[in-house]
Amino acid sequence: MSKGRNALGIALIVGGFIWVIYLILKIKGYATVNADSLSEEKVAAIKASIRHTVILAGLLIGGLMGAIVQRSKFCIAAACHSIVTTRDMTQTRAYAMALFVAILGTQLLYKLGYVDIGYSIYISSPFTWLSYIVGGFIFGVGIVYAGGCASRILVRAGEGNLGGLVSVMAFILSSGAALWGITAKIRTDYFNSLTLNFHNQYLPNIVNIVPGWVIILAIEAILVIFMLKAPKDSEWRGWRWPLSGAAIGLTVVLAWWINGMAFKTIPLVDIFSFTGPDDPTLLQTWRPTSLTFALADAQTFRYIILWTGETINFAVASVLGVVAGSVIAAIFSRTFYWVAPPLQQFKYNLVGGLLMGFGAVVAMGCNIGQGLSGFSTLSIGSILTMSFILLGAIAGAKYMSWRLMKET
């Protein structure tokens, strides 16, 4: 790709980030209005504007992630299994950079009062430890078979890779079945029934013998040390991978910010409909969230096939944005090709997608939902889930290597 085309692509991505920040500030401005002086029509108009702004932000943030992943080849699946396959930690360090930025940005937003992560599902949900362990491990095995993580298979489909498309469709089928279908009872009756009694899952609240800022600083320091220990001849020693990881982390932060601002602003505008942040109706529609693809992919499919009976939300918009962003980036960079992998790879794509969908729903999130968005809240459930995603990916990679050696 020419330098001019590269520069234009980077400029468009930077412009996309600026646009999202503008949308966040737009919602923040609504929080200053005097709700007592507003008519019902004006309240309804502001609520509609906030909803449309959040949806537009979902499309933009998803589009940014899709474009960045497409151009950089960022993949948390590779970050996990490369530890035992290629022994190249470049992708692992890119994930560490994404996590560094996501934690730093999310915790700053929380401390400044812009996002109350205490109301997110990662902090407020019961600690279903077996779900996190089993779901995370199954998902980890699945990403090896599918050849990519939850975001990467969407991007591969957007690039024209039919194997990626098979993985996406299998992921949607399996996650939908685990959410609302034939395997949902297994999830609710067995995995979700085993819990530990925590008031919430925020790590600094659980490990309260040291100040929270010390825990945050320690985690960030570990990530920095890991990144700095990259060999001198590593691909990491450039701008591409650190910048890509930081940009992915920033999409997670911006997603928290826009949804957190909407959650805080809606009750201030509509003081008659909502009693406060604990209002069940408010939480059902406006609960703070960030990027995730477990529930979001299944919701997107439902929206596409049941359009008249469904409404678009941030999650659906972000999935559509990832696909659109990857398609645009692939066409722009002239890397869009229809590719049909060998039959054996199709089988792996199918099995991997099915494992990923079930595992992600059982674990309440995928490698992005739990591994970045959830981890950025310092939820112990997210940390546990990501640990077992890593173990599952390593186990899956070792098993596939053993099979290949046996066949040869």
Image (cartoon, grey):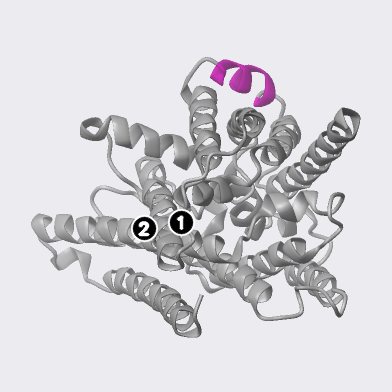
User: Which residue is at 53% across, 49% downward?
Assistant: 156
User: Residue 308 at what x, y percent from top left?
Assistant: 20, 33
Type of the residue with mark 2? Leu
User: Residue 101 at what x, y percent from top left?
Assistant: 63, 71
Magenta segment: 183-192
Q: Secondary structure of the magenta portion, mostly?
A: helix
Q: Secondary structure at mark 2?
A: helix
Question: Does residue 106 show up?
Answer: no
> Which mark, by number, is residue 59?
2
Front in this rendered view, residue 185 or 274: 185
Question: Does residue 297 show up?
Answer: yes
Type of the residue with mark 1? Phe
User: Residue 80 at what x, y percent from top left?
Assistant: 77, 51
Q: Secondary structure at mark 1?
A: loop
User: Which residue is at 74% across, 35% downward?
Assistant: 129
Front in this rendered view, residue 270 or 227: 227
The answer to which image quadrant residue 304 occupies is top left
User: Which residue is at 54% across, 26% downward?
Assistant: 174
The answer to which image quadrant residue 196 occupies is top right
> Which mark, by number, is residue 1?
none
Seen in the image, is 29 located left or right of residue 110? left
Point out the tag, 1 or 2, that comes first from the N-terminus: 2
The quarter of the image holding the C terminus is: top right
Task: Calculate the distance from the C-alpha at mark 1 to the C-alpha at mark 2.
Answer: 21 Å
User: Residue 90 at what x, y percent from top left?
Assistant: 76, 66
Front in this rendered view, residue 324 or 362: 324
Seen in the image, is 97 located left or right of residue 294? right
Q: Which residue is mark 1?
A: 336
User: Which residue is at 67% across, 64% downward?
Assistant: 99
Q: Is 97 placed above or below 256 here?
A: below
